[in-house]
Amino acid sequence: MLAKWKQFLGKIKILRSLKARLFFIILLAGIIPSTGMRYAILQSYEDRSVSVRIADVQNQFKILANHLIIYGYLHDTSSEVVNSELDQLSNLYDGRVLIIDKNFKVIKDTYGISEGKTVISEEVIKCFKGTSTTNYDRKNGYIEITTPIVDTVVSTGAASPKPEDTGEANLAEGVILSSVSTNTIMTTLDILNRRALIVELIALVFIVAIALAMAKLLTAPFERVTQAINDVKAGFTDEQISVNDYVETEHIVDAFNQLLGRMKVLDDSRQEFVSNVSHELKTPLTSMKVLADSLLMQEEVPAELYKEFMTDIANEIERENKIINDLLSLVKMDKKAADINITSVDINELLELILKRLRPIARKKEIEIIFESIRPVTAEVDEVKLTLALSNLVENAIKYNNPSGWVKVTLDADHQFFSVEVADSGIGIPEEAQEHIYERFYRVDKSHSREIGGTGLGLAITRSVILMHRGSIKVMSEEGKGTVFTVKIPLIHPV
């Protein structure tokens, strides 16, 4: 039931508003104490009034008890003085007075309806033992009081018998049982309650106004954050926003500014990527157009020159095809691990096949390829994608090497990861360029890269493949002294 109620409240939009919640919290914080104070004050007044009334009545009836003894009223109820006093007290307190003798018999009732009857109750019995009792009945609006009638005065010139003589120590001669109305107290309480309600309603108006103002004031920084984000979204500004009113808004703004910075980097990267793709695809086409136009402008082209131009055109087509293939590979990598095909692969055998395919290219540059396997390694990888990544590393080591140089591939593993180290004696990578080498179309030496047919996408593809395998790639290089790439991949692919 509670869950359904929360679900219902969650659907009410206004109750999900921070401003509305702050308003209700402040409103309740004002109403609850004022209401509680009103009830506390009224209750205190009621308790105090009842206590005063009881004390007043008890004093009056103690005096009456003495008169009853003096005038011997317990034996003769004809005393006009006592009867007049009884009527006066009954009218004064708008109540009823009963006089009960030692036999529990009512000898006087100011209402005149219970005379001669016997009254036996716990309160009366206690009172006969000398203990006065009081009972406040708020529901019926009266206070019941018992007062013992004790012979403590000298009557008709003779001393009253002592308790030791009667054998009835601490026993009363009779009991005054009175019921006192509390109508005046209740009337006063009603008047006070109405006035308190009026004051409370006036206070409520002020509390509502204060709650509205405070809720708006307290949520204003969040509205400024929302407005600033909307401005950025609409394109009115691309600067970082700043709302430091609260620690919470500062955290939100910091997170948004970081996101904004990341989006700017991605946007710049996208624009640069599009520009680079356009340039890279356009360059071979331009070269082919120039070659074709040169052939068309000559009427009689020698077969040797025609063959040379067609060879150049074929090379440019091959270069265009390589760029397109690399782009397609990179797009496939961007689909992340959803398309990864994990199987158990012998990494030693995989590296031997890669090096076997690349040795003819190495021999053309008189580069020696060395493979060192520390131990047999079997791992859960995507064989096709990992082959592409490692091939790019070894091929780059060959392409950017010095004549008669060397490339060394080392395979090792521990209980959790296997590592492939590709080291070369090549031209090296400048330190300032090392952090950019995984960017798409980035080239350390563009002219040299173009000469050897590089597209600037190989390392970007390699890094994407390794990240798909939850691995890492590091580079250590010194310009003119060679480069070492270290790839580290889990033996068991994380699920």
Image: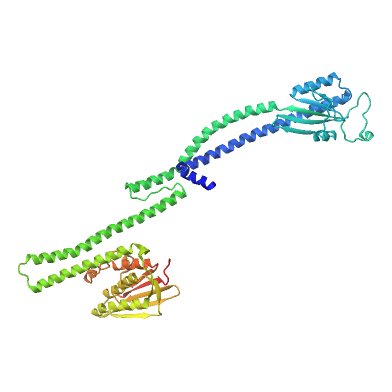
Q: Is residue 85 left or right of residue 261?
A: right
User: Which of the pair 487/112 is nearer the observer?
Assistant: 112
Point 54% across, 46% down: residue: 2
Total marks shown come to: 0
Q: Position of residue 273 (x, y in %)?
A: 27, 60
Q: Position of residue 351 (x, y in %)?
A: 34, 77
Q: Is residue 44 left or right of residue 171?
A: left
- Whether residue 184 is visible here, answered yes or no, is yes
* In the image, residue 410 above or below residue 328: below
- Whether residue 441 is visible here, answered yes or no, is no
Q: Is residue 45 left or right of residue 387?
A: right
The C terminus, quarter of image: bottom left
Q: Is residue 476 left or right of residue 166?
A: left
Colour style of the rendered protein structure: rainbow
Q: Position of residue 151 (x, y in %)?
A: 88, 29
When asked about the image quadrant of residue 386, the answer is bottom left
User: Which of the pair 52/448 is nearer the observer?
Assistant: 52
Point 93% across, 24% down: residue: 157
Q: Position of residue 403 (x, y in %)?
A: 25, 78
User: Which of the pair 320/395 is nearer the observer?
Assistant: 320
When asked about the image quadrant of residue 116, the answer is top right
Which residue is situated farthest in the top direction here? 80
When asked about the image quadrant of residue 426, the answer is bottom left
